[in-house]
Amino acid sequence: MSRKRTTGFVSVIILSLLLIASQGFNIYLLLYSAKLRDDRETAIEALQEIEAAGFVYESDAAAMVAEAEERAASEAEIRTREQLLAGIQARLESGEGAASVFRRLYEDKLVVLDAGRYFFLPVSEDIPGNPFLETDWEVDANGRMQYVGTNASVQTRQGIDVSKYQEKIDWKKVAADGIEFAVIRVGSRGSSEGKLMEDETFEDNIKGALAAGLEVGVYFYSQAVDAEEAREEAAFVLDRIEPYDITGPVAIDIESADSAGARTADLSKEGYTETARTFCSVVEGAGYRPCIYGNLKSYALLLEPEELVDYTVWYAYYSQPLYFPYAFTYWQYTATGRVDGIDGDVDLNLEVTFR
């Protein structure tokens, strides 16, 4: 064999080996891509296509990889959707309410149900967050909420809030039943006519609670429609608590009247926020600790809480687990509590502080 022919033959062999190596590398890339996605069916389909063709060009390999990725993504999306729907169905069939299901799905939103409508509101990053886990709270055999978390710096106290609806109260029995503080209604403003009214049992309650050794705070049910009326409400409260040693919160109760003739029916979030801020400012100026009482609707739909971060939060929520993204000091956790010395239901509250 001549040197020239030998050289040509060797060149053909080398080129063939290079082609085989190139195709082998392409096949490796294709299989490795499929493996990374852990999609066995996609890998099998890719192998079948390669086997049928006998080989694959580099450009074709890239297209096959892209197609496999798209197919895997589509299948994963379908599986995810099916799993999501199955999870929702299982929760609803177990008796869990739609609102609770939505809240688990939209963890970055504040989900509020009001008058048959769901609202999905952003959680403000400008407000201190709720530092507790769902599992940090537990109701004991007496119906009292307890902190069962692991943070040793958390301190809690049991309390009640009362008004004329509790009628005559034996405050010595209340104190003996483990209640450490009471928040007493001073009065309210009428939702239609706007008249200021003192609670019928205010004086009896405040004198009885103080005599029993409880820490006492007060609240006023507001229906103020502007800053002027909020100042009027604050002055009404300050005038009536002046003779007493009030060391607990002095709170404005912000709730919508939810009636067609309510004076606050068309009050905006800015309006509600202004009344709350004005009331608290007057109270603080008088040397007391201002506080804002409200439920989920109050803090989500009525108020702009990021404008009120300087004031103590008293939050009303009666279900478990507690649903509130923001920090709080007082939690009204039930309206059907039972306490010795009070006939019938009473609101139970927990004060939560840190050492």
Image: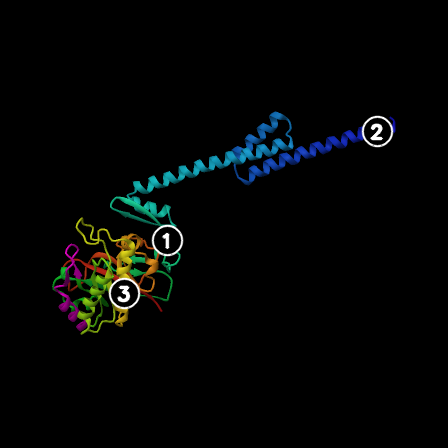
**Residue at point 83% right, 30% down?**
7
User: Are discs 3 and 1 less than 8 Å apart at CB?
Assistant: no
Marks 3/2: CA distance? 100 Å
Numbered tag placed on residue 6 in the rendering: 2
The answer to whether residue 199 is above or below residue 30 is below
Marks 3/1: CA distance? 23 Å
Determine the image quadrant of residue 86. top left
Quadrant containing the C terminus in the rendered view: bottom left
Residue type highlighted by circle 1: Val
Q: Point out the stretch of residues depicted in magenta.
A: 188-212
Q: Nearer the viewer, residue 77 or 178?
A: 77
Count all numbered tags in the image, as a single digit. 3
How far across and down, in percent of the image, does residue 322 sit? 31, 54
Q: Is residue 28 magenta?
A: no
Q: Disc 3 on helix, strand or loop?
A: helix
For marks 2 and 1, the one nearer the N-term is 2
How far across and down, in percent of the image, does residue 101 sit? 33, 45
Q: Nearer the viewer, mark 3 or mark 1?
A: 3
Q: In the image as oriented, which residue stretches furthest toward the right? A: 2
How far across and down, in percent of the image, does residue 213 sit? 20, 72
**Residue at point 21% right, 74% down?**
245
How far across and down, in percent of the image, does residue 292 sit? 27, 61
Residue type highlighted by circle 3: Cys
**Side of 324 where 240 appears, left or right:** left
For marks 3 and 1, the one nearer the N-term is 1
Q: Disc 1 on helix, strand or loop?
A: loop
**Side of 161 where 69 appears, left or right:** right
Q: Is residue 194 magenta?
A: yes
Residue identifier under label 1: 123
Q: Disc 2 on helix, strand or loop?
A: helix
Residue identifier under label 3: 280
